[in-house]
Image: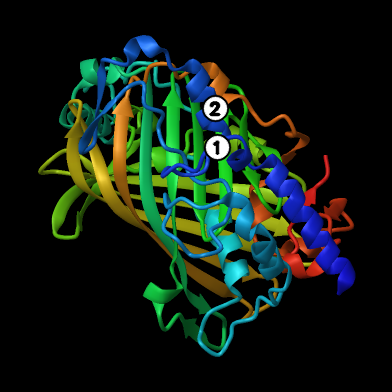
Protein backbone atom coordinates (compact mmCIF):
# COMPACT_ATOMS: atom_id res chain seq x y z
CA UNK A 1 0.00 0.00 0.00
CA UNK A 2 2.91 2.33 0.82
CA UNK A 3 4.41 1.64 -2.59
CA UNK A 4 1.12 2.54 -4.28
CA UNK A 5 0.92 5.79 -2.33
CA UNK A 6 4.46 6.61 -3.33
CA UNK A 7 3.63 5.90 -6.95
CA UNK A 8 0.62 8.20 -6.92
CA UNK A 9 2.51 10.95 -5.08
CA UNK A 10 5.26 10.81 -7.65
CA UNK A 11 2.71 10.78 -10.45
CA UNK A 12 1.02 13.88 -9.07
CA UNK A 13 4.36 15.70 -8.92
CA UNK A 14 5.12 14.76 -12.53
CA UNK A 15 1.69 15.88 -13.70
CA UNK A 16 1.95 19.17 -11.84
CA UNK A 17 5.31 19.73 -13.48
CA UNK A 18 3.87 19.12 -16.92
CA UNK A 19 0.59 20.91 -16.31
CA UNK A 20 0.06 24.19 -18.18
CA UNK A 21 -1.41 25.54 -14.94
CA UNK A 22 2.13 26.11 -13.62
CA UNK A 23 2.99 28.41 -16.48
CA UNK A 24 -0.19 30.44 -16.74
CA UNK A 25 -2.99 31.80 -14.62
CA UNK A 26 -6.24 29.95 -14.18
CA UNK A 27 -8.63 30.86 -16.97
CA UNK A 28 -12.36 30.27 -17.55
CA UNK A 29 -11.63 28.27 -20.71
CA UNK A 30 -10.93 24.61 -21.14
CA UNK A 31 -7.54 23.01 -20.66
CA UNK A 32 -5.23 23.56 -23.58
CA UNK A 33 -4.73 20.87 -26.22
CA UNK A 34 -1.80 20.52 -28.64
CA UNK A 35 -4.01 21.91 -31.41
CA UNK A 36 -4.51 25.18 -29.58
CA UNK A 37 -0.76 25.77 -29.40
CA UNK A 38 -0.49 25.36 -33.12
CA UNK A 39 -3.37 27.74 -33.69
CA UNK A 40 -1.88 30.41 -31.45
CA UNK A 41 1.32 30.29 -33.45
CA UNK A 42 -0.46 30.29 -36.77
CA UNK A 43 -3.27 32.81 -36.34
CA UNK A 44 -2.11 36.22 -37.50
CA UNK A 45 -2.93 39.34 -35.49
CA UNK A 46 -3.73 41.12 -38.71
CA UNK A 47 -7.13 39.43 -38.65
CA UNK A 48 -8.07 40.80 -35.24
CA UNK A 49 -10.57 43.24 -36.67
CA UNK A 50 -12.33 40.76 -38.91
CA UNK A 51 -15.04 38.31 -37.98
CA UNK A 52 -15.84 34.71 -38.82
CA UNK A 53 -19.48 33.80 -39.24
CA UNK A 54 -20.32 30.88 -36.98
CA UNK A 55 -23.34 28.81 -36.22
CA UNK A 56 -25.19 31.02 -33.78
CA UNK A 57 -22.39 33.51 -33.04
CA UNK A 58 -19.81 35.94 -34.38
CA UNK A 59 -16.37 35.86 -32.86
CA UNK A 60 -13.15 37.80 -33.52
CA UNK A 61 -10.76 35.81 -35.64
CA UNK A 62 -7.83 36.51 -33.36
CA UNK A 63 -9.55 34.83 -30.43
CA UNK A 64 -8.26 31.30 -29.98
CA UNK A 65 -10.92 28.63 -30.41
CA UNK A 66 -11.54 26.90 -27.11
CA UNK A 67 -10.31 23.29 -27.25
CA UNK A 68 -11.50 20.26 -25.38
CA UNK A 69 -9.98 19.65 -21.98
CA UNK A 70 -7.04 17.27 -22.03
CA UNK A 71 -7.71 15.15 -18.98
CA UNK A 72 -10.64 13.34 -17.42
CA UNK A 73 -12.98 15.35 -15.23
CA UNK A 74 -12.82 13.68 -11.85
CA UNK A 75 -15.50 15.97 -10.43
CA UNK A 76 -18.02 15.30 -13.15
CA UNK A 77 -18.03 18.98 -14.20
CA UNK A 78 -19.40 20.03 -17.55
CA UNK A 79 -16.87 20.41 -20.31
CA UNK A 80 -15.57 23.93 -20.28
CA UNK A 81 -15.61 24.51 -16.52
CA UNK A 82 -12.22 25.54 -15.24
CA UNK A 83 -10.25 23.60 -12.68
CA UNK A 84 -6.62 22.88 -11.84
CA UNK A 85 -5.62 19.88 -13.89
CA UNK A 86 -3.16 18.45 -11.40
CA UNK A 87 -5.37 18.74 -8.34
CA UNK A 88 -7.44 15.61 -8.84
CA UNK A 89 -5.28 13.47 -11.11
CA UNK A 90 -4.11 11.19 -8.34
CA UNK A 91 -7.65 10.41 -7.21
CA UNK A 92 -8.74 9.86 -10.80
CA UNK A 93 -5.89 7.44 -11.53
CA UNK A 94 -6.61 5.61 -8.28
CA UNK A 95 -10.20 5.26 -9.39
CA UNK A 96 -9.20 3.89 -12.77
CA UNK A 97 -6.77 1.35 -11.36
CA UNK A 98 -9.25 0.18 -8.73
CA UNK A 99 -12.12 -0.46 -11.14
CA UNK A 100 -13.39 -4.00 -11.56
CA UNK A 101 -12.06 -5.35 -14.88
CA UNK A 102 -15.06 -7.62 -15.37
CA UNK A 103 -17.10 -7.07 -18.51
CA UNK A 104 -20.02 -9.20 -17.44
CA UNK A 105 -23.50 -7.74 -17.39
CA UNK A 106 -24.47 -6.75 -13.88
CA UNK A 107 -27.77 -6.96 -12.09
CA UNK A 108 -28.85 -3.51 -13.22
CA UNK A 109 -28.58 -4.51 -16.86
CA UNK A 110 -25.38 -2.58 -17.57
CA UNK A 111 -21.98 -3.98 -18.42
CA UNK A 112 -18.76 -2.75 -16.79
CA UNK A 113 -18.78 1.00 -17.32
CA UNK A 114 -15.20 1.28 -18.48
CA UNK A 115 -15.65 -1.63 -20.88
CA UNK A 116 -18.77 0.01 -22.26
CA UNK A 117 -16.90 3.29 -22.71
CA UNK A 118 -14.04 1.60 -24.51
CA UNK A 119 -16.45 -0.14 -26.85
CA UNK A 120 -18.42 3.08 -27.41
CA UNK A 121 -15.35 5.11 -28.28
CA UNK A 122 -13.77 2.31 -30.29
CA UNK A 123 -16.80 1.74 -32.50
CA UNK A 124 -18.51 5.16 -32.55
CA UNK A 125 -15.68 7.58 -31.81
CA UNK A 126 -14.02 8.01 -35.21
CA UNK A 127 -15.29 5.52 -37.81
CA UNK A 128 -14.26 6.10 -41.41
CA UNK A 129 -16.25 6.22 -44.63
CA UNK A 130 -16.10 3.19 -46.94
CA UNK A 131 -14.04 4.72 -49.76
CA UNK A 132 -11.40 7.25 -50.63
CA UNK A 133 -12.81 10.34 -52.32
CA UNK A 134 -11.24 13.45 -53.76
CA UNK A 135 -13.37 16.54 -53.19
CA UNK A 136 -11.52 18.45 -55.91
CA UNK A 137 -12.87 16.08 -58.57
CA UNK A 138 -16.10 17.37 -60.13
CA UNK A 139 -19.29 15.37 -59.86
CA UNK A 140 -20.12 13.19 -62.87
CA UNK A 141 -21.86 15.05 -65.66
CA UNK A 142 -25.57 14.34 -65.65
CA UNK A 143 -26.18 12.06 -68.62
CA UNK A 144 -29.16 9.98 -69.68
CA UNK A 145 -27.93 8.55 -72.97
CA UNK A 146 -26.28 5.13 -72.65
CA UNK A 147 -26.46 5.39 -68.85
CA UNK A 148 -28.41 2.96 -66.64
CA UNK A 149 -31.46 4.56 -65.07
CA UNK A 150 -30.15 3.73 -61.57
CA UNK A 151 -26.93 5.67 -62.25
CA UNK A 152 -28.51 8.68 -63.97
CA UNK A 153 -31.12 8.93 -61.20
CA UNK A 154 -28.37 8.99 -58.57
CA UNK A 155 -26.53 11.73 -60.48
CA UNK A 156 -29.69 13.82 -60.62
CA UNK A 157 -30.34 13.36 -56.88
CA UNK A 158 -26.78 14.45 -56.07
CA UNK A 159 -27.16 17.54 -58.26
CA UNK A 160 -30.28 18.44 -56.28
CA UNK A 161 -28.49 17.75 -53.00
CA UNK A 162 -25.57 20.00 -53.94
CA UNK A 163 -27.96 22.81 -54.88
CA UNK A 164 -30.01 22.39 -51.69
CA UNK A 165 -26.83 22.43 -49.57
CA UNK A 166 -25.78 25.83 -50.85
CA UNK A 167 -24.51 25.30 -54.35
CA UNK A 168 -21.23 24.18 -55.83
CA UNK A 169 -19.77 27.69 -56.06
CA UNK A 170 -20.18 28.39 -52.35
CA UNK A 171 -18.89 24.96 -51.35
CA UNK A 172 -15.84 25.17 -53.61
CA UNK A 173 -14.89 28.45 -51.92
CA UNK A 174 -14.38 26.59 -48.61
CA UNK A 175 -10.69 25.86 -48.00
CA UNK A 176 -10.99 24.67 -44.41
CA UNK A 177 -13.69 24.16 -41.81
CA UNK A 178 -14.17 23.85 -38.06
CA UNK A 179 -17.02 22.33 -36.05
CA UNK A 180 -17.57 21.85 -32.33
CA UNK A 181 -20.34 19.83 -30.74
CA UNK A 182 -21.61 18.02 -27.69
CA UNK A 183 -22.71 14.40 -27.54
CA UNK A 184 -23.97 11.58 -25.35
CA UNK A 185 -23.17 7.89 -25.78
CA UNK A 186 -24.66 4.81 -24.14
CA UNK A 187 -24.65 1.04 -24.51
CA UNK A 188 -28.38 0.42 -24.34
CA UNK A 189 -28.86 -3.30 -24.96
CA UNK A 190 -27.00 -6.59 -24.90
CA UNK A 191 -28.44 -9.76 -26.41
CA UNK A 192 -27.30 -13.39 -26.34
CA UNK A 193 -28.90 -16.55 -27.64
CA UNK A 194 -30.73 -17.06 -24.34
CA UNK A 195 -31.56 -13.60 -23.03
CA UNK A 196 -31.81 -9.90 -23.75
CA UNK A 197 -30.53 -7.43 -21.16
CA UNK A 198 -31.58 -3.80 -21.53
CA UNK A 199 -30.14 -0.79 -19.81
CA UNK A 200 -32.91 0.22 -17.40
CA UNK A 201 -31.78 3.82 -17.03
CA UNK A 202 -30.34 4.97 -20.33
CA UNK A 203 -30.39 8.65 -19.41
CA UNK A 204 -28.39 8.11 -16.22
CA UNK A 205 -25.94 5.66 -17.80
CA UNK A 206 -25.16 7.89 -20.80
CA UNK A 207 -21.62 9.21 -21.08
CA UNK A 208 -21.45 12.92 -21.91
CA UNK A 209 -18.72 14.65 -23.84
CA UNK A 210 -17.84 16.77 -26.81
CA UNK A 211 -15.75 16.92 -29.94
CA UNK A 212 -13.93 19.32 -32.23
CA UNK A 213 -13.37 18.68 -35.92
CA UNK A 214 -10.98 20.46 -38.26
CA UNK A 215 -10.84 19.93 -42.02
CA UNK A 216 -8.62 21.32 -44.73
CA UNK A 217 -8.20 20.75 -48.45
CA UNK A 218 -7.07 18.41 -49.76
CA UNK A 219 -8.19 15.38 -47.73
CA UNK A 220 -6.89 16.58 -44.34
CA UNK A 221 -8.88 16.33 -41.13
CA UNK A 222 -8.38 16.08 -37.38
CA UNK A 223 -10.88 15.22 -34.64
CA UNK A 224 -10.67 15.20 -30.84
CA UNK A 225 -13.47 13.47 -28.98
CA UNK A 226 -13.62 13.37 -25.18
CA UNK A 227 -16.26 11.27 -23.43
CA UNK A 228 -16.47 10.02 -19.87
CA UNK A 229 -12.90 10.95 -18.96
CA UNK A 230 -11.30 9.30 -22.02
CA UNK A 231 -10.24 10.96 -25.23
CA UNK A 232 -9.79 9.71 -28.78
CA UNK A 233 -7.75 11.56 -31.39
CA UNK A 234 -7.82 10.76 -35.09
CA UNK A 235 -6.55 12.54 -38.14
CA UNK A 236 -5.39 12.47 -41.71
CA UNK A 237 -2.62 14.50 -43.33
CA UNK A 238 -3.80 13.61 -46.84
CA UNK A 239 -1.50 10.60 -47.07
CA UNK A 240 -2.05 8.68 -43.85
CA UNK A 241 -4.99 8.09 -41.52
CA UNK A 242 -4.14 7.53 -37.88
CA UNK A 243 -5.93 7.18 -34.58
CA UNK A 244 -4.89 7.44 -30.94
CA UNK A 245 -6.77 5.86 -28.06
CA UNK A 246 -5.69 5.55 -24.42
CA UNK A 247 -5.67 1.76 -24.67
CA UNK A 248 -3.96 1.31 -28.06
CA UNK A 249 -1.80 4.39 -28.40
CA UNK A 250 -1.22 5.87 -31.86
CA UNK A 251 -1.58 3.62 -34.89
CA UNK A 252 -2.01 4.07 -38.62
CA UNK A 253 -5.23 2.82 -40.18
CA UNK A 254 -5.21 0.13 -42.83
CA UNK A 255 -6.21 0.82 -46.40
CA UNK A 256 -6.50 4.01 -48.45
CA UNK A 257 -7.06 7.50 -47.07
CA UNK A 258 -10.76 7.87 -46.25
CA UNK A 259 -12.93 10.67 -44.87
CA UNK A 260 -14.21 10.72 -41.32
CA UNK A 261 -17.77 9.40 -41.20
CA UNK A 262 -18.73 12.07 -38.67
CA UNK A 263 -18.03 14.72 -41.33
CA UNK A 264 -20.63 13.07 -43.58
CA UNK A 265 -23.27 13.47 -40.90
CA UNK A 266 -24.47 16.83 -42.20
CA UNK A 267 -21.21 18.75 -41.69
CA UNK A 268 -19.50 18.45 -45.09
CA UNK A 269 -21.93 18.37 -48.05
CA UNK A 270 -19.17 18.53 -50.66
CA UNK A 271 -17.42 15.40 -49.34
CA UNK A 272 -20.81 13.71 -48.96
CA UNK A 273 -21.70 14.37 -52.59
CA UNK A 274 -18.27 13.10 -53.70
CA UNK A 275 -18.72 9.96 -51.59
CA UNK A 276 -21.96 9.07 -53.40
CA UNK A 277 -20.67 10.05 -56.87
CA UNK A 278 -20.51 6.41 -58.01
CA UNK A 279 -23.66 5.27 -56.23
CA UNK A 280 -26.89 3.98 -57.72
CA UNK A 281 -30.50 4.78 -56.85
CA UNK A 282 -32.26 1.66 -55.56
CA UNK A 283 -35.68 3.04 -54.68
CA UNK A 284 -37.64 5.15 -52.21
CA UNK A 285 -38.47 4.94 -48.53
CA UNK A 286 -40.21 7.04 -45.90
CA UNK A 287 -37.96 8.18 -43.06
CA UNK A 288 -39.81 9.70 -40.10
CA UNK A 289 -42.73 10.52 -42.39
CA UNK A 290 -40.54 12.07 -45.08
CA UNK A 291 -40.29 10.46 -48.51
CA UNK A 292 -36.68 9.86 -49.51
CA UNK A 293 -34.64 8.56 -52.43
CA UNK A 294 -32.16 5.81 -51.51
CA UNK A 295 -28.62 5.86 -52.92
CA UNK A 296 -26.41 2.81 -52.45
CA UNK A 297 -22.62 2.76 -52.48
CA UNK A 298 -20.55 -0.42 -52.23
CA UNK A 299 -16.84 -0.56 -51.43
CA UNK A 300 -14.81 -2.18 -54.22
CA UNK A 301 -12.88 -5.45 -53.63
CA UNK A 302 -9.48 -3.72 -53.89
CA UNK A 303 -10.35 -1.34 -51.05
CA UNK A 304 -11.71 -4.16 -48.89
CA UNK A 305 -8.55 -6.19 -49.42
CA UNK A 306 -6.35 -3.23 -48.52
CA UNK A 307 -8.31 -2.74 -45.29
CA UNK A 308 -8.03 -6.42 -44.29
CA UNK A 309 -5.17 -7.73 -42.21
CA UNK A 310 -4.08 -11.01 -40.65
CA UNK A 311 -7.03 -13.15 -39.56
CA UNK A 312 -9.46 -10.24 -39.99
CA UNK A 313 -10.96 -9.94 -43.47
CA UNK A 314 -13.38 -7.17 -44.44
CA UNK A 315 -15.96 -8.96 -46.59
CA UNK A 316 -18.20 -6.04 -47.51
CA UNK A 317 -18.94 -2.42 -46.66
CA UNK A 318 -22.13 -0.82 -47.97
CA UNK A 319 -23.32 2.76 -47.46
CA UNK A 320 -26.91 3.93 -47.98
CA UNK A 321 -27.90 7.59 -48.18
CA UNK A 322 -31.51 8.73 -47.82
CA UNK A 323 -32.13 12.08 -49.51
CA UNK A 324 -35.36 13.95 -48.85
CA UNK A 325 -37.59 14.35 -51.89
CA UNK A 326 -38.93 17.58 -50.36
CA UNK A 327 -35.73 19.41 -49.39
CA UNK A 328 -33.07 17.49 -51.31
CA UNK A 329 -30.96 17.17 -48.13
CA UNK A 330 -29.47 14.03 -46.61
CA UNK A 331 -31.69 13.04 -43.67
CA UNK A 332 -30.58 9.48 -42.95
CA UNK A 333 -27.42 7.47 -43.50
CA UNK A 334 -26.82 3.78 -42.92
CA UNK A 335 -23.65 1.82 -43.39
CA UNK A 336 -22.88 -1.79 -42.65
CA UNK A 337 -19.64 -3.68 -42.84
CA UNK A 338 -19.01 -7.37 -42.27
CA UNK A 339 -15.73 -8.72 -40.91
CA UNK A 340 -14.67 -12.36 -40.90
CA UNK A 341 -12.16 -13.49 -38.27
CA UNK A 342 -10.64 -16.94 -38.79
CA UNK A 343 -9.67 -18.65 -35.57
CA UNK A 344 -6.75 -21.04 -35.36
CA UNK A 345 -8.05 -24.30 -36.77
CA UNK A 346 -11.64 -23.54 -35.81
CA UNK A 347 -14.72 -22.05 -37.32
CA UNK A 348 -14.77 -18.45 -38.51
CA UNK A 349 -16.48 -15.78 -36.44
CA UNK A 350 -18.30 -12.92 -38.15
CA UNK A 351 -18.83 -9.39 -36.86
CA UNK A 352 -21.38 -7.14 -38.53
CA UNK A 353 -21.32 -3.48 -37.57
CA UNK A 354 -24.32 -1.37 -38.63
CA UNK A 355 -24.57 2.38 -38.01
CA UNK A 356 -27.84 4.22 -38.60
CA UNK A 357 -27.58 8.02 -38.39
CA UNK A 358 -30.51 10.45 -38.47
CA UNK A 359 -29.69 14.07 -39.35
CA UNK A 360 -31.86 16.95 -38.24
CA UNK A 361 -32.08 20.71 -37.66
CA UNK A 362 -30.53 21.93 -40.90
CA UNK A 363 -29.55 25.59 -40.72
CA UNK A 364 -27.43 27.73 -43.05
CA UNK A 365 -23.92 28.75 -41.99
CA UNK A 366 -22.32 31.18 -44.44
CA UNK A 367 -24.69 29.92 -47.13
CA UNK A 368 -24.04 26.19 -46.52
CA UNK A 369 -26.73 23.99 -44.97
CA UNK A 370 -25.42 22.22 -41.87
CA UNK A 371 -27.25 19.61 -39.77
CA UNK A 372 -27.07 20.91 -36.20
CA UNK A 373 -28.28 17.78 -34.43
CA UNK A 374 -28.71 14.09 -34.95
CA UNK A 375 -28.49 10.65 -33.44
CA UNK A 376 -26.90 7.33 -34.34
CA UNK A 377 -27.85 3.77 -33.44
CA UNK A 378 -25.06 1.20 -33.72
CA UNK A 379 -25.55 -2.55 -33.70
CA UNK A 380 -22.56 -4.85 -33.22
CA UNK A 381 -23.64 -8.39 -34.16
CA UNK A 382 -21.42 -11.44 -33.68
CA UNK A 383 -22.32 -14.83 -35.12
CA UNK A 384 -20.76 -18.00 -36.51
CA UNK A 385 -18.64 -20.61 -34.78
CA UNK A 386 -21.30 -22.71 -33.07
CA UNK A 387 -25.07 -22.65 -33.17
CA UNK A 388 -26.92 -20.41 -30.72
CA UNK A 389 -23.75 -18.49 -29.84
CA UNK A 390 -24.58 -15.10 -31.33
CA UNK A 391 -24.39 -11.84 -29.41
CA UNK A 392 -25.74 -8.42 -30.26
CA UNK A 393 -24.81 -5.11 -28.65
CA UNK A 394 -26.79 -1.95 -29.28
CA UNK A 395 -25.20 1.46 -28.74
CA UNK A 396 -26.66 4.93 -29.19
CA UNK A 397 -25.30 8.44 -29.65
CA UNK A 398 -27.01 11.82 -29.76
CA UNK A 399 -25.17 14.98 -30.74
CA UNK A 400 -25.67 18.70 -31.24
CA UNK A 401 -23.46 21.12 -33.14
CA UNK A 402 -22.57 24.25 -31.18
CA UNK A 403 -20.27 26.08 -33.60
CA UNK A 404 -19.31 25.91 -37.25
CA UNK A 405 -16.84 28.10 -39.14
CA UNK A 406 -15.33 28.09 -42.62
CA UNK A 407 -12.03 29.43 -43.95
CA UNK A 408 -10.45 29.89 -40.53
CA UNK A 409 -7.36 32.12 -40.94
CA UNK A 410 -4.07 30.62 -39.80
CA UNK A 411 -5.04 26.97 -40.10
CA UNK A 412 -2.14 25.20 -41.79
CA UNK A 413 -0.83 21.73 -42.62
CA UNK A 414 1.08 21.74 -39.33
CA UNK A 415 -2.20 21.15 -37.53
CA UNK A 416 -2.61 17.77 -39.25
CA UNK A 417 0.82 16.26 -38.60
CA UNK A 418 0.57 12.68 -37.25
CA UNK A 419 1.77 12.01 -33.69
CA UNK A 420 5.50 11.65 -33.21
CA UNK A 421 4.98 8.31 -31.45
CA UNK A 422 2.97 6.85 -34.35
CA UNK A 423 3.89 3.18 -34.53
CA UNK A 424 5.06 1.76 -37.84
CA UNK A 425 2.60 -1.14 -37.75
CA UNK A 426 -0.90 -0.40 -38.96
CA UNK A 427 -4.02 -1.36 -37.04
CA UNK A 428 -6.76 -3.62 -38.31
CA UNK A 429 -10.37 -2.44 -38.02
CA UNK A 430 -11.09 -5.56 -35.94
CA UNK A 431 -8.95 -4.23 -33.11
CA UNK A 432 -11.98 -2.72 -31.38
CA UNK A 433 -13.96 -5.96 -31.27
CA UNK A 434 -14.17 -7.67 -27.85
CA UNK A 435 -10.99 -9.56 -27.14
CA UNK A 436 -12.38 -13.03 -26.55
CA UNK A 437 -12.96 -13.63 -30.27
CA UNK A 438 -9.77 -12.15 -31.67
CA UNK A 439 -7.64 -13.85 -29.04
CA UNK A 440 -8.51 -17.30 -30.39
CA UNK A 441 -6.37 -16.73 -33.48
CA UNK A 442 -3.40 -15.49 -31.50
CA UNK A 443 -0.94 -18.22 -32.46
CA UNK A 444 -1.46 -18.28 -36.21
CA UNK A 445 -1.64 -14.52 -36.57
CA UNK A 446 1.27 -13.71 -34.25
CA UNK A 447 -1.02 -11.75 -31.99
CA UNK A 448 0.58 -10.00 -29.05
CA UNK A 449 -1.15 -8.50 -26.04
CA UNK A 450 -0.58 -4.92 -25.08
CA UNK A 451 1.18 -4.13 -21.84
CA UNK A 452 -0.68 -5.62 -18.87
CA UNK A 453 1.49 -4.30 -16.04
CA UNK A 454 -1.53 -2.82 -14.24
CA UNK A 455 -4.08 -5.53 -14.89
CA UNK A 456 -6.77 -3.75 -12.94
CA UNK A 457 -6.50 -0.67 -15.12
CA UNK A 458 -7.56 -2.53 -18.25
CA UNK A 459 -11.10 -3.80 -18.35
CA UNK A 460 -10.62 -5.92 -21.44
CA UNK A 461 -7.19 -6.42 -23.02
CA UNK A 462 -7.07 -5.22 -26.62
CA UNK A 463 -4.87 -7.12 -29.01
CA UNK A 464 -3.15 -6.07 -32.19
CA UNK A 465 -1.80 -7.97 -35.15
CA UNK A 466 1.95 -7.75 -35.59
CA UNK A 467 3.17 -6.80 -39.06
Image quadrant where residue 28 sits: top left
At 17% from the left edge and 34% from the top edge, which residue is drawn? 364
Residue 306 vs 247, above or below: the answer is above
- Along the viewing direction, whichever of 44 and 448 lies nearer the viewer: 44
Residue 94 position, x and y percent, is 71, 67
The number of discs equals 2
What SS does tag 2 mark? helix
Packing grade of label 1 (10 A; few <14, some 14-19, many >=20) is: some
Residue sticking out furthest to the top: 46
Residue 234 position, x and y percent, is 57, 39
- Along the viewing direction, whichever of 343 and 398 lies nearer the viewer: 398
Image position of 343 (left or right of 137): right
Q: Which residue is mark 1?
A: 33
Residue 399 vs 387, above or below: the answer is above
At 55% from the left edge and 55% from the top edge, which residue is drawn? 121
Residue sticking out furthest to the left: 326
Asked if marks 2 and 1 touch (Cβ < 8 Å), the reply is yes
Image position of 375 (left or right of 213): left
Determine if residue 460 is in view.
Answer: no
Q: Which residue is mark 2?
A: 37
Residue sticking out furthest to the front: 25
Residue 436 position, x and y percent, is 74, 68
What SS does tag 1 mark? loop
Image quadrant where residue 381 sits: bottom right
Amino acid sequence: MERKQGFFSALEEVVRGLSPARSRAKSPGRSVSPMSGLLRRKVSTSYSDSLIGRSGSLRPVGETLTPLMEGPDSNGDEIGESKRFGSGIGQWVRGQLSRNPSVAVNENGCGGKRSDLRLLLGVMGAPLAPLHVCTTDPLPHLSIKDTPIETSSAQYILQQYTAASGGQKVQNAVKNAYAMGKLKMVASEFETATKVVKNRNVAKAAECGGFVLWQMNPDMWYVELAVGGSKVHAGCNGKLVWRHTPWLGAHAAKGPVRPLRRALQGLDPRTTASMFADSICIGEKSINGEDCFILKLTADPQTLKARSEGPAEIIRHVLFGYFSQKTGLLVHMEDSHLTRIQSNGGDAVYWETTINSFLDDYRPVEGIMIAHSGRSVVTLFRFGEMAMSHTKTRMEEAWTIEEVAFNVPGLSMDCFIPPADLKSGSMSEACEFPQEERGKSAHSAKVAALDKTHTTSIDNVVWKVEI
